[in-house]
Amino acid sequence: MGDAVLVLEDGSVHRGEAFGARGRSLGEAVFATGMTGYQETLTDPSYHRQIVVATAPHIGNTGWNDEDDESQRIQVAGYVVRDPARRPSNWRSRRDLADELAAQGVVGISGVDTRAITRRLREAGSMRAGLFSGLSHAALADTTALRAQVLDSPGMAGADLAGAVTTGEPYTVPATGQTRFRVAALDLGIKANTPRMLAERGVETRVVPSTASIDELLEGNPDGVFLSNGPGDPAAAEHAVTLTAEVLRREVPLFGICFGNQILARALGLGTYKMRYGHRGINVPVVDHANGTVAITSQNHGFAVAGEPGARVDSSFGTVHLSHSCPNDGTVEGLTCEGVPAFSVQYHPEAAAGPHDAADLFDRFALLLGNR
């Protein structure tokens, strides 16, 4: 029968072997399509309270190193893989993936049909789920009781999760070489590579907690504000939306990514909605309606901005261009404000999805800072 089980909200059951820590974990089941980069995925705060299903069949081949973490810990609620590597092989590897999961208390399961799970999530949508291991055979066999625990767990809609992943205290990442600009980054679940990308462009980044007041955010009169990625429902992030609206009123240059894109949208008076299964992978195409170019991007989001791609809409801060979209499903992927110095994208420009298609967005932000 196996010593671990994944139970989905709809009652489907997938049995396999315990992988990582033993125990119980509840969260939203989602699938990620990246063939590589599992360490970055697992440590991305945007995956907080989510059980991630890896569509790539072989996971753990390159082990775990001490350089590629995107935060201070593994953030996922659980990990579901088909065929874990028996032995990692990479010159940068320091330990086995399963050992790292166990050391950080992250429950996983292996030996399951991840293609079948992914098809179910695509057809029915992301749903609540539970991972269970380390229990008696009788407890693992009682799937009715296990499903009851899943159904008692909270859903992602309405979840305000930034506070669970934000920094406790402000910290500063210095610019590389001469400091050209200083930016305040609202930490809604920021990834470590983002300040590094800004630093390469001469930007000093002061990262502040998601609970910061407007005075704390704009302490020292920064040249601009950055809204980070993060987990949860943007409709529940009222404080971040209020802060963003105040930044827009003061016409401080602003750049947002992923969750930050949704926060900017709501500050502009636009709506957001929960997607059926979201975008989670490193091969998602995005069209820039300003020039017709297409970028291959890294994404991780289950909510999106409502609207017609390419349209221009009115807001209390002037006209807003819904400037980017995903050709796969017509999802809005970016905003450009024409009345205030602000723009955002739904994807992760700090993540190299093969080529560095989106890295120029940091150059665009630097130009905006220079024009203040």
Image (spheres, helix red, strand yellow):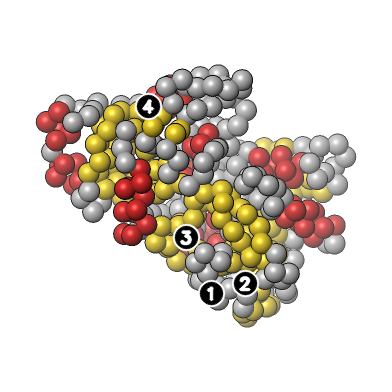
- Residue at left offset 56%, top offset 51%: 283
Q: Considering the numbered disc 2 on the image, is that residue within a helix, a strand or a loop? A: strand
In the rendered view, does 86 fall on the left or right side of 314?
A: left
Q: Is residue 65 visible?
A: yes
Crowding at mark 4 (Cα within 10 Å: few <14, some 14-19, many 20+): many
Q: In the image, what residue occupies the spot 68% across and 47% down?
A: 355
Q: Is residue 305 above or below residue 204?
A: below
Q: CA distance from mark 3 to mark 1?
A: 13 Å
CB under 8 Å between discs 4 and 1: no
User: In the rendered structure, are the residues bearing label 2 and label 3 in contact, judged by CB atoms less than 8 Å apart?
Assistant: no
Mark 2 in CB contact with mark 4 (< 8 angstroms) = no
Image mark for residue 303: 3
Which numbered dot is residue 307? Answer: 1
Circle 1 Cα neighbour tier, 10 Å, few/some/many (<14 / 14–19 / ≥20): some
Percent position of residue 196, x then y? 71, 39
Sequence-wise first label, 2 or 1: 1
Q: Position of residue 10 (x, y in %)?
A: 23, 54
Please, is residue 74 above or below residue 103 in the view? Answer: below
Secondary structure category for the residue under label 3: strand
The Cα atoms of the two marked residues, 2 and 1, are separated by: 7 Å
State if disc 1 and disc 3 touch (CB < 8 Å).
Answer: no
According to the image, label 4 marks what residue?
Answer: 20
Q: What is the CA distance from the residue labelled 3 to the residue labelled 4?
A: 29 Å
Circle 2 residue: 322
Q: Quadrant of the N terminus?
A: top left
Say what secondary structure mark 1 lies in: loop
- Return the residue nearer the eye: 183 or 259: 259
Say what amino acid the circle numbered 3 marks: Phe
